Amino acid sequence: MAAAEVFPAATVVVVRDASQGLELLLLERTPDAEGKAGPSVFPGGRVEPADLAGGVLDDAALRRAAVREAREEAGLQLAAESLLPISRWITPELSPRRFDTWFYLTALAPDAPVCVDGSEIARHRWLAPREALEAHQRQALRLAPPTFVTVSWLVDLETTSRAREVLAPGPLVTFRPRICRLAEGACMLYPGDAGYEAGDPETPGPRHRLWALASSWRYERG
């Protein structure tokens, strides 16, 4: 079976300086038909034709998509030039819906308003990165793997300026997950992991992976 078409997309990791340190913005998607709360996500979505200038998909188009999605989903007014590219996530071939998503980081003023659309997005919350990970572990909210990994990057960064300083240097990290199913969950291998090419988490060597287990999740890099 041929792999599904890959759609370009953009996501914005919005952070701010709060009294207790760095906080990030998470949007909770509306509940499903059974009333189950949706995942908590960063603002973002597919690149639309209107984002393209002359039909060209480039960095400017991705930034326009990121700015538009942040405005539509959370009422944010962002400047395209404020967006710092920090990662790129390409959905595995086995997925029925695939995206090539560029993640950008930007900072808001502490008192900047957020107004969710009330349709696709049910509510928002500002959380310290560690609080977000702990809430995920106790199932108080749900983070998708790209969100969990990105939040993990921010855990030890105390200010928005520090986040930009640490995440700005290249090269850009590209994630093309290779999923290994386990009895207790899954291990998602990323490029740079010793087991990536073979799809074997037992391969000795460098680690770059997410353990997504029923008991807990853990991002490992090094």
Image (spheres, rainbow, N blue to C red):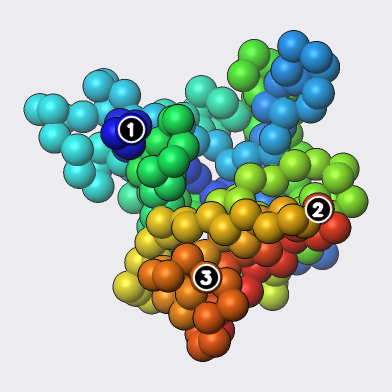
Pinpoint residue 25: horizontal percent, then vertical percent: 66, 45
Q: Which quadrant of the figure has residue 47? A: top left
Q: Secondary structure at mark 3?
A: loop
Query: Which of labels 2 and 3 is toward the front?
Result: 3
Of pointers 2 and 3, the one earlier in the residue sequence: 3
Quarter the C terminus occupies: bottom right
Mark 1 crowd level (few <14, some 14–19, many ≥20, 10 Å Cα): few
Q: Which residue is mark 1?
A: 1
Q: Which mark is residue 200?
A: 3
Mark 2 to mark 3 CA distance (whole Å): 20 Å
Q: Is residue 59 above or below residue 195?
A: above
In this view, 171 is above or below 132: below
Q: Label 2, on which residue?
A: 214
Amino acid of disc 3:
Asp
Binning the other alpha carbons within 10 Å of mark 2 as few (below 14), some (14 to 19) or many (20 upward) gives few
For the residues labelled 3 and 1, say whether their Cβ atoms are less than 8 Å apart: no
- Dot 3 or dot 1, earlier in sequence: 1
Q: Is residue 157 visible?
A: no
Q: Residue at x 24, y 43 (%)?
A: 60
The numbered dot on residue 172 is none
Residue type beneath disc 1: Met
Q: Are marks 2 and 3 in contact (CB under 8 Å)?
A: no
- At x 63%, y 74%, the residue is 220
Residue type (three-letter) at the residue carrying disc 2: Ala
